[in-house]
Image (spheres, grey):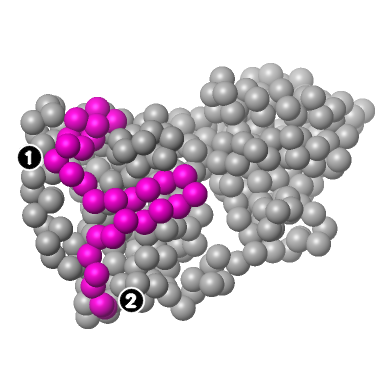
Amino acid sequence: MRHSGTKTIETERLILRRFALTDAEAMYRNWASDPEVTRYLTWPTHSSVGITEEVLGGWIPSYQSDDYYQWAIVFKENGSEPIGSISAVDLDDSVSKVHIGYCLGRAWWHRGIMTEALGAVMDFFFDEVGAERIESRHDTRNPHSGMVMKKCGMRLEGVLRRSDRNNQGICDACWYALLKSERESAKGAYRYVALREVPELKDSAADWFHSKWKVPKEAYLECMDDYLSGRTEYGWYLCLCGDEIAGGLGVIENDFHDRKDLTPNVCAVYTEEAHRRKGIAGRLLDMAVEDLRAKAVSPVYLLTDHTGFYERYGWEFLCMVQGNDPEPSRMYIHR
């Protein structure tokens, strides 16, 4: 690989830059002191700003090396204050391999920020450093980190049992990777997003779901507003093809049936006919389940009259329930 060292990278919402000693207070306050952020990391929660200053004091001299890559993630709305970090934690010249690690302050979770940062850093390593393989891993109990990797095109290569150690002890680790030769096909025509990542699409998404299911648009808007405002973690997920919605689904309290105890429910699953048989619905289902599980919401339920489809994605038939139709419908569960 040809090395050029840490350089400033700018995206639509972010600036990725070198750390400075003056970042210590913000780093400590925004993420290093938060045990929820450090739960699955390999370094311990910082107990004082002084520890953070010591860490930065060790990082900064390394910037003199051409093969050192460590970025502070700065949200443009916040000016210059870092909200997280992303770095190459392992470089291997012999096979041009880069291993990336990252963390983000809790106040900025579930907004697509780390996906944006990781995608930009991957482009940098492929295009400017000459990497042939980019990889990352996460504790199996931290599936949200895996969602970030998948959104950036990485593929799950396997789970290595009892292979890693973090602040929770020895753990199983999911390993993801993307090769340079796979990058263009991985980017593909489709982009999978939670509505919180693209809140500007709320109105058009509500129109789209209304056109498919004839439920009043206002009902979708009410659920989406609850999700976007943080009043609920029951989200809405879209597959985009360019500027068009190719598929989507939502999660709500109850999908019009009499079993109020079976909650929450995936609803409004739909893929445009021109985009079917490409795995879109399956990826959206996996995305919703993993996102909810990362927020300690499990199991999840789904009402349908279909058989044979949802079973492919880990759903199991649970029971019959009475919905709006005269005949009972099938209730599925994802544990």
**Looking at the image, which residue is at 28% across and 60% down?**
7
Q: Is residue 162 magenta?
A: no
Where residue 108 appears, x then y in whole percent?
41, 34
Vertical relation: 133 (above or below) 139:
below
Dot 2: few (<14), some (14–19), or many (≥20) neighbours within 10 Å?
some
| Kind of residue at badge 1 | Glu
Where residue 307 appears, x then y in whole percent?
76, 49
**Looking at the image, which residue is at 38% across and 71% down?**
126
Mark 2, residue position: 130
**Looking at the image, which residue is at 33% across and 76% down?**
130
Dot 1: few (<14), some (14–19), or many (≥20) neighbours within 10 Å?
few
Could you tell whether 270 is left or right of 187 in the image? Answer: right
| Kind of residue at badge 2 | Gly
Closer to the camera in the image, 73 or 132: 73
Which stretch is magenta? 1-30
Image quarter of residue 249: top right
Where residue 78 appears, x then y in whole percent?
38, 33
Q: Which mark is residue 304?
A: none
